[in-house]
Image (cartoon, helix red, strand yellow):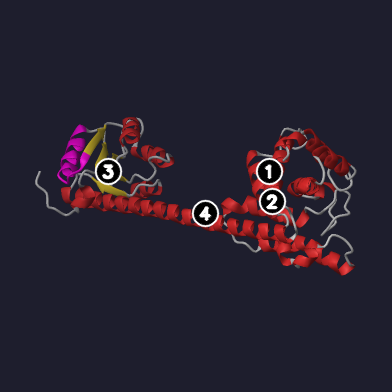
Amino acid sequence: MGVCMIYNDRDTEGARILIVDDVEMNRLILEDIVKNMGCETIVAEDGEQALELAAKNRPHLILSDISMPGMDGYELCKVLKANKRTKDIPIIFISAYDDPKDIVVGLKLGGEDYITKPFIAEVVQARVSVHLHLYAAKRELMEMNRRLQISVDAQLKQMELEKKNILYALANIAARNSGCEPGHVERLRHNCKVLAQGMQLSTAFEDRISDSYIDTIELAAALCDIGNIGIPKELLRKRSGFTEEETEIIHNHAEIGAKLLSDLHVNSDYNDFLSISIDISRYHHENWDGSGYPEGLKGSQIPVAAQIVSIMEAYCTLTGEKKHGREEALEIMEKDSGTKFNPVIFNICRKIARQLS
Protein backbone atom coordinates (compact mmCIF):
# COMPACT_ATOMS: atom_id res chain seq x y z
CA MET A 1 0.00 0.00 0.00
CA GLY A 2 1.56 3.24 -1.12
CA VAL A 3 1.24 6.15 1.29
CA CYS A 4 2.30 9.76 1.42
CA MET A 5 5.28 10.53 3.71
CA ILE A 6 3.76 12.73 6.44
CA TYR A 7 5.77 11.60 9.47
CA ASN A 8 9.23 11.99 10.96
CA ASP A 9 11.42 8.90 10.46
CA ARG A 10 13.30 9.70 13.67
CA ASP A 11 10.18 9.13 15.75
CA THR A 12 8.75 6.15 13.87
CA GLU A 13 11.75 4.07 12.75
CA GLY A 14 11.86 0.90 14.85
CA ALA A 15 9.00 1.98 17.12
CA ARG A 16 7.02 -0.98 18.50
CA ILE A 17 3.28 -0.70 17.90
CA LEU A 18 0.84 -3.09 19.58
CA ILE A 19 -2.30 -3.56 17.48
CA VAL A 20 -5.32 -4.99 19.33
CA ASP A 21 -8.40 -6.01 17.32
CA ASP A 22 -10.51 -9.15 17.21
CA VAL A 23 -11.02 -8.75 13.44
CA GLU A 24 -8.10 -10.12 11.42
CA MET A 25 -8.67 -7.82 8.41
CA ASN A 26 -8.44 -4.74 10.65
CA ARG A 27 -5.18 -6.02 12.12
CA LEU A 28 -3.72 -6.63 8.65
CA ILE A 29 -4.67 -3.17 7.39
CA LEU A 30 -3.19 -1.41 10.42
CA GLU A 31 -0.05 -3.55 10.26
CA ASP A 32 0.48 -2.57 6.65
CA ILE A 33 0.04 1.14 7.42
CA VAL A 34 2.43 1.29 10.38
CA LYS A 35 5.03 -1.01 8.81
CA ASN A 36 5.26 1.45 5.94
CA MET A 37 6.28 4.00 8.57
CA GLY A 38 9.23 1.84 9.60
CA CYS A 39 7.51 0.62 12.76
CA GLU A 40 7.62 -2.88 14.21
CA THR A 41 4.23 -4.47 14.90
CA ILE A 42 2.90 -6.76 17.60
CA VAL A 43 -0.66 -8.04 17.22
CA ALA A 44 -3.23 -9.25 19.73
CA GLU A 45 -6.71 -10.64 19.15
CA ASP A 46 -8.20 -9.56 22.49
CA GLY A 47 -7.57 -7.57 25.65
CA GLU A 48 -6.15 -10.44 27.69
CA GLN A 49 -3.56 -11.27 25.04
CA ALA A 50 -2.74 -7.58 24.68
CA LEU A 51 -1.94 -7.31 28.40
CA GLU A 52 0.55 -10.17 28.17
CA LEU A 53 2.22 -8.73 25.07
CA ALA A 54 2.35 -5.21 26.53
CA ALA A 55 4.07 -6.47 29.68
CA LYS A 56 6.52 -8.58 27.70
CA ASN A 57 7.38 -6.22 24.83
CA ARG A 58 6.81 -2.71 26.29
CA PRO A 59 5.42 -1.16 23.08
CA HIS A 60 5.89 2.52 22.33
CA LEU A 61 2.22 2.90 21.36
CA ILE A 62 -0.99 0.83 21.37
CA LEU A 63 -3.75 0.89 18.75
CA SER A 64 -6.75 -0.78 20.38
CA ASP A 65 -10.24 -1.57 19.15
CA ILE A 66 -12.98 -0.71 21.63
CA SER A 67 -15.61 -3.35 20.93
CA MET A 68 -14.05 -6.78 21.51
CA PRO A 69 -15.31 -9.99 23.16
CA GLY A 70 -14.18 -10.45 26.74
CA MET A 71 -12.06 -7.51 27.81
CA ASP A 72 -12.99 -4.51 25.65
CA GLY A 73 -10.70 -1.61 24.78
CA TYR A 74 -11.88 0.57 27.64
CA GLU A 75 -11.17 -2.11 30.24
CA LEU A 76 -7.79 -2.81 28.63
CA CYS A 77 -6.96 0.89 28.94
CA LYS A 78 -7.96 0.93 32.62
CA VAL A 79 -5.70 -2.00 33.44
CA LEU A 80 -2.74 -0.63 31.48
CA LYS A 81 -3.03 2.83 33.05
CA ALA A 82 -3.22 1.31 36.53
CA ASN A 83 0.09 -0.51 36.05
CA LYS A 84 3.24 1.49 36.81
CA ARG A 85 5.18 -0.27 34.04
CA THR A 86 2.61 0.40 31.28
CA LYS A 87 0.76 3.55 32.40
CA ASP A 88 2.86 5.88 30.21
CA ILE A 89 2.30 3.96 26.97
CA PRO A 90 0.05 6.09 24.73
CA ILE A 91 -3.20 4.39 23.62
CA ILE A 92 -5.14 5.31 20.49
CA PHE A 93 -8.65 3.85 20.35
CA ILE A 94 -10.01 2.56 17.04
CA SER A 95 -13.73 2.08 16.46
CA ALA A 96 -16.45 2.03 13.86
CA TYR A 97 -18.40 4.49 16.02
CA ASP A 98 -17.73 8.21 16.08
CA ASP A 99 -20.21 9.20 18.78
CA PRO A 100 -18.61 12.04 20.81
CA LYS A 101 -19.69 10.27 24.02
CA ASP A 102 -17.56 7.25 23.09
CA ILE A 103 -14.61 9.53 22.37
CA VAL A 104 -14.97 11.34 25.70
CA VAL A 105 -15.16 8.04 27.63
CA GLY A 106 -11.93 6.87 26.03
CA LEU A 107 -10.09 10.11 26.73
CA LYS A 108 -11.26 10.17 30.36
CA LEU A 109 -9.83 6.69 30.84
CA GLY A 110 -6.42 7.92 29.76
CA GLY A 111 -6.51 7.29 26.02
CA GLU A 112 -4.54 9.77 23.95
CA ASP A 113 -6.56 9.76 20.73
CA TYR A 114 -9.39 8.20 18.72
CA ILE A 115 -9.43 6.88 15.11
CA THR A 116 -12.61 5.80 13.38
CA LYS A 117 -13.08 3.07 10.79
CA PRO A 118 -12.76 2.67 7.87
CA PHE A 119 -9.07 3.53 8.18
CA ILE A 120 -7.58 6.34 6.15
CA ALA A 121 -3.86 5.62 5.93
CA GLU A 122 -2.78 9.26 6.10
CA VAL A 123 -4.91 9.86 9.21
CA VAL A 124 -3.56 6.79 10.97
CA GLN A 125 0.00 7.79 10.06
CA ALA A 126 -0.48 11.35 11.27
CA ARG A 127 -2.02 10.29 14.59
CA VAL A 128 0.57 7.57 15.20
CA SER A 129 3.44 9.89 14.30
CA VAL A 130 2.24 12.67 16.59
CA HIS A 131 1.88 10.38 19.61
CA LEU A 132 5.16 8.58 18.99
CA HIS A 133 6.83 11.97 18.86
CA LEU A 134 5.16 13.07 22.11
CA TYR A 135 6.05 9.76 23.76
CA ALA A 136 9.69 10.08 22.68
CA ALA A 137 9.82 13.71 23.84
CA LYS A 138 8.30 12.78 27.22
CA ARG A 139 10.79 9.95 27.75
CA GLU A 140 13.67 12.23 26.75
CA LEU A 141 12.47 14.86 29.21
CA MET A 142 12.13 12.27 31.99
CA GLU A 143 15.66 11.04 31.30
CA MET A 144 17.00 14.58 31.35
CA ASN A 145 15.21 15.19 34.66
CA ARG A 146 16.61 11.95 36.06
CA ARG A 147 20.16 12.91 35.12
CA LEU A 148 19.65 16.43 36.43
CA GLN A 149 18.30 15.07 39.72
CA ILE A 150 21.31 12.77 40.08
CA SER A 151 23.61 15.72 39.44
CA VAL A 152 21.72 17.97 41.88
CA ASP A 153 21.62 15.24 44.56
CA ALA A 154 25.36 14.67 44.19
CA GLN A 155 26.04 18.39 44.54
CA LEU A 156 23.74 18.67 47.56
CA LYS A 157 25.43 15.72 49.26
CA GLN A 158 28.82 17.29 48.61
CA MET A 159 27.60 20.59 50.05
CA GLU A 160 26.22 18.88 53.15
CA LEU A 161 29.46 16.92 53.58
CA GLU A 162 31.41 20.17 53.41
CA LYS A 163 29.07 21.72 55.99
CA LYS A 164 29.63 18.75 58.29
CA ASN A 165 33.39 19.01 57.86
CA ILE A 166 33.23 22.69 58.80
CA LEU A 167 31.12 21.85 61.87
CA TYR A 168 33.59 19.18 62.98
CA ALA A 169 36.47 21.61 62.49
CA LEU A 170 34.66 24.16 64.68
CA ALA A 171 33.89 21.47 67.26
CA ASN A 172 37.57 20.50 67.43
CA ILE A 173 38.61 24.14 67.83
CA ALA A 174 36.05 24.54 70.64
CA ALA A 175 37.39 21.38 72.32
CA ARG A 176 41.00 22.63 72.13
CA ASN A 177 39.95 26.03 73.48
CA SER A 178 38.37 24.20 76.42
CA GLY A 179 41.65 22.41 77.13
CA CYS A 180 40.33 18.96 76.18
CA GLU A 181 42.96 16.31 75.55
CA PRO A 182 43.67 15.29 71.93
CA GLY A 183 41.23 12.62 70.81
CA HIS A 184 38.51 13.66 73.28
CA VAL A 185 35.93 14.24 70.54
CA GLU A 186 36.68 10.88 68.90
CA ARG A 187 36.40 9.06 72.24
CA LEU A 188 33.11 10.77 72.98
CA ARG A 189 31.67 9.76 69.58
CA HIS A 190 32.77 6.15 70.00
CA ASN A 191 31.46 5.84 73.54
CA CYS A 192 28.09 7.39 72.67
CA LYS A 193 27.73 4.84 69.89
CA VAL A 194 28.60 1.96 72.26
CA LEU A 195 26.11 3.16 74.89
CA ALA A 196 23.37 3.59 72.26
CA GLN A 197 24.03 0.04 71.03
CA GLY A 198 23.66 -1.23 74.58
CA MET A 199 20.39 0.67 74.97
CA GLN A 200 19.09 -0.86 71.74
CA LEU A 201 19.26 -4.27 73.43
CA SER A 202 17.25 -3.03 76.42
CA THR A 203 13.46 -3.38 76.46
CA ALA A 204 13.28 0.17 77.81
CA PHE A 205 14.73 1.66 74.63
CA GLU A 206 14.55 -0.96 71.86
CA ASP A 207 11.63 0.81 70.17
CA ARG A 208 13.45 4.17 70.14
CA ILE A 209 17.02 3.20 69.23
CA SER A 210 17.37 2.08 65.61
CA ASP A 211 20.55 1.32 63.68
CA SER A 212 20.29 4.65 61.86
CA TYR A 213 19.80 6.44 65.21
CA ILE A 214 23.03 4.87 66.48
CA ASP A 215 24.92 5.98 63.38
CA THR A 216 23.48 9.49 63.69
CA ILE A 217 24.28 9.96 67.36
CA GLU A 218 27.87 8.87 66.71
CA LEU A 219 28.16 11.74 64.23
CA ALA A 220 26.13 14.28 66.20
CA ALA A 221 27.81 13.74 69.58
CA ALA A 222 30.94 15.52 68.34
CA LEU A 223 28.97 18.76 68.13
CA CYS A 224 27.75 18.81 71.74
CA ASP A 225 30.01 21.70 72.80
CA ILE A 226 30.33 23.46 69.46
CA GLY A 227 28.80 26.52 71.16
CA ASN A 228 32.09 26.95 73.06
CA ILE A 229 33.38 28.56 69.87
CA GLY A 230 31.54 31.67 71.08
CA ILE A 231 32.94 31.63 74.63
CA PRO A 232 36.21 33.43 75.51
CA LYS A 233 39.13 30.98 75.61
CA GLU A 234 40.42 32.21 78.97
CA LEU A 235 37.00 31.55 80.52
CA LEU A 236 36.87 28.03 79.06
CA ARG A 237 40.28 27.23 80.55
CA LYS A 238 39.29 28.52 83.99
CA ARG A 239 38.55 25.66 86.41
CA SER A 240 37.11 27.37 89.50
CA GLY A 241 36.19 30.67 91.14
CA PHE A 242 33.56 31.64 88.58
CA THR A 243 31.51 34.74 89.15
CA GLU A 244 27.77 34.61 88.56
CA GLU A 245 28.23 36.54 85.33
CA GLU A 246 30.97 34.16 84.11
CA THR A 247 28.81 31.15 84.90
CA GLU A 248 25.99 32.63 82.86
CA ILE A 249 28.36 33.23 79.92
CA ILE A 250 29.61 29.66 80.01
CA HIS A 251 26.07 28.27 80.26
CA ASN A 252 25.27 30.29 77.16
CA HIS A 253 27.33 27.89 75.02
CA ALA A 254 24.38 25.47 74.89
CA GLU A 255 22.13 28.03 73.20
CA ILE A 256 24.95 29.36 71.02
CA GLY A 257 25.60 25.87 69.66
CA ALA A 258 21.92 25.13 69.09
CA LYS A 259 21.45 28.47 67.30
CA LEU A 260 24.47 27.85 65.08
CA LEU A 261 23.11 24.45 64.06
CA SER A 262 19.53 25.71 63.67
CA ASP A 263 20.68 28.34 61.19
CA LEU A 264 22.02 25.69 58.83
CA HIS A 265 19.92 24.86 55.78
CA VAL A 266 20.14 21.20 54.88
CA ASN A 267 18.17 18.85 52.64
CA SER A 268 15.85 16.13 53.92
CA ASP A 269 18.59 13.47 54.03
CA TYR A 270 20.25 15.37 56.87
CA ASN A 271 17.21 16.39 58.92
CA ASP A 272 17.68 13.62 61.52
CA PHE A 273 21.36 14.50 61.92
CA LEU A 274 20.57 18.18 62.36
CA SER A 275 17.63 17.62 64.73
CA ILE A 276 19.62 15.29 67.00
CA SER A 277 22.66 17.59 66.89
CA ILE A 278 20.53 20.54 68.03
CA ASP A 279 18.98 18.49 70.86
CA ILE A 280 22.42 17.39 72.04
CA SER A 281 23.95 20.85 71.85
CA ARG A 282 21.07 22.54 73.68
CA TYR A 283 20.18 19.92 76.31
CA HIS A 284 23.24 17.81 77.21
CA HIS A 285 23.70 19.87 80.40
CA GLU A 286 20.14 19.26 81.60
CA ASN A 287 19.94 17.06 84.71
CA TRP A 288 17.57 14.17 85.40
CA ASP A 289 16.22 15.94 88.52
CA GLY A 290 15.64 19.24 86.68
CA SER A 291 18.61 21.10 88.18
CA GLY A 292 20.49 21.55 84.89
CA TYR A 293 20.51 24.22 82.20
CA PRO A 294 19.49 26.00 79.97
CA GLU A 295 15.78 25.19 80.49
CA GLY A 296 15.71 23.07 83.64
CA LEU A 297 14.15 20.09 81.86
CA LYS A 298 13.45 17.07 84.00
CA GLY A 299 13.30 13.29 83.45
CA SER A 300 11.87 12.19 80.12
CA GLN A 301 11.55 15.82 79.00
CA ILE A 302 15.26 15.64 78.17
CA PRO A 303 15.89 14.17 74.67
CA VAL A 304 17.43 10.70 74.86
CA ALA A 305 20.38 11.73 72.67
CA ALA A 306 21.24 14.53 75.12
CA GLN A 307 21.01 12.06 78.06
CA ILE A 308 23.44 9.70 76.31
CA VAL A 309 25.95 12.48 75.63
CA SER A 310 25.61 13.82 79.18
CA ILE A 311 26.70 10.49 80.65
CA MET A 312 29.45 9.84 78.13
CA GLU A 313 30.88 13.36 78.34
CA ALA A 314 31.18 12.99 82.12
CA TYR A 315 32.87 9.60 81.65
CA CYS A 316 35.30 10.90 79.00
CA THR A 317 36.19 13.91 81.17
CA LEU A 318 36.84 11.75 84.25
CA THR A 319 38.92 9.17 82.40
CA GLY A 320 40.72 11.73 80.20
CA GLU A 321 44.45 12.21 80.68
CA LYS A 322 44.37 9.15 82.96
CA LYS A 323 42.78 11.11 85.82
CA HIS A 324 40.66 8.13 86.84
CA GLY A 325 40.41 4.50 85.79
CA ARG A 326 37.18 3.10 84.33
CA GLU A 327 35.77 1.65 87.55
CA GLU A 328 36.78 4.64 89.63
CA ALA A 329 35.10 7.01 87.16
CA LEU A 330 31.90 4.96 87.17
CA GLU A 331 31.83 4.93 90.97
CA ILE A 332 32.11 8.73 91.01
CA MET A 333 29.34 9.00 88.41
CA GLU A 334 27.07 6.59 90.28
CA LYS A 335 26.64 9.22 92.99
CA ASP A 336 24.87 11.33 90.35
CA SER A 337 22.64 8.52 89.06
CA GLY A 338 19.05 9.59 89.57
CA THR A 339 19.98 13.24 90.05
CA LYS A 340 22.18 14.24 87.13
CA PHE A 341 21.87 11.05 85.04
CA ASN A 342 18.96 8.86 83.99
CA PRO A 343 19.46 5.84 86.31
CA VAL A 344 18.26 3.34 83.69
CA ILE A 345 20.75 4.58 81.08
CA PHE A 346 23.51 4.73 83.68
CA ASN A 347 22.89 1.09 84.64
CA ILE A 348 23.21 0.12 80.98
CA CYS A 349 26.42 2.15 80.85
CA ARG A 350 27.84 0.10 83.73
CA LYS A 351 26.96 -3.15 82.00
CA ILE A 352 28.75 -2.25 78.74
CA ALA A 353 31.60 -0.33 80.42
CA ARG A 354 34.30 -2.75 79.19
CA GLN A 355 33.56 -1.68 75.62
CA LEU A 356 34.17 2.01 76.38
CA SER A 357 37.42 3.62 75.34
Q: Nearer the viewer, residue 242 or 167?
A: 242
Report, in whole angstroms, how far the alpha carbon at label 2 lies from the one at label 1.
Answer: 9 Å
- Quickly name the residue at label 1: 190
Using the image, tell me which numbered label, if any, was put on residue 94: 3
Residue type at tag 4: Lys
- Quickly name the residue at label 4: 157
Quarter of image, res 246: bottom right
Horizontal relation, residue 152 to residue 337: left or right: left
Which element carries disc 2, helix, strand or loop? helix
User: Does residue 34 show up?
Assistant: yes
Residue type at tag 2: Val
Using the image, tell me which numbered label, if any, was put on residue 185: 2
Horizontal relation, residue 233 to residue 219: left or right: right
Residue type at tag 3: Ile
Q: Earlier in the sequence, mark 3 or mark 1?
A: 3
Q: Position of residue 341 (x, y in %)?
A: 84, 45
Asked if the residue at tag 1 contacts the one at tag 2, i.e. Cβ–Cβ closer than 8 Å, the answer is no
Q: Let me know if residue 39 is in the magenta part.
A: yes
Q: Earlier in the sequence, mark 2 or mark 1?
A: 2
Q: Position of residue 357 (x, y in %)?
A: 72, 40
Which element carries disc 1, helix, strand or loop? helix
Categorize mark 2 by other alpha carbons within 10 Å: few (<14), some (14-19), many (20+).
Answer: many
Can you tell which of label 4 and label 3 is closer to the viewer? 4
Q: Earlier in the sequence, mark 2 or mark 4?
A: 4
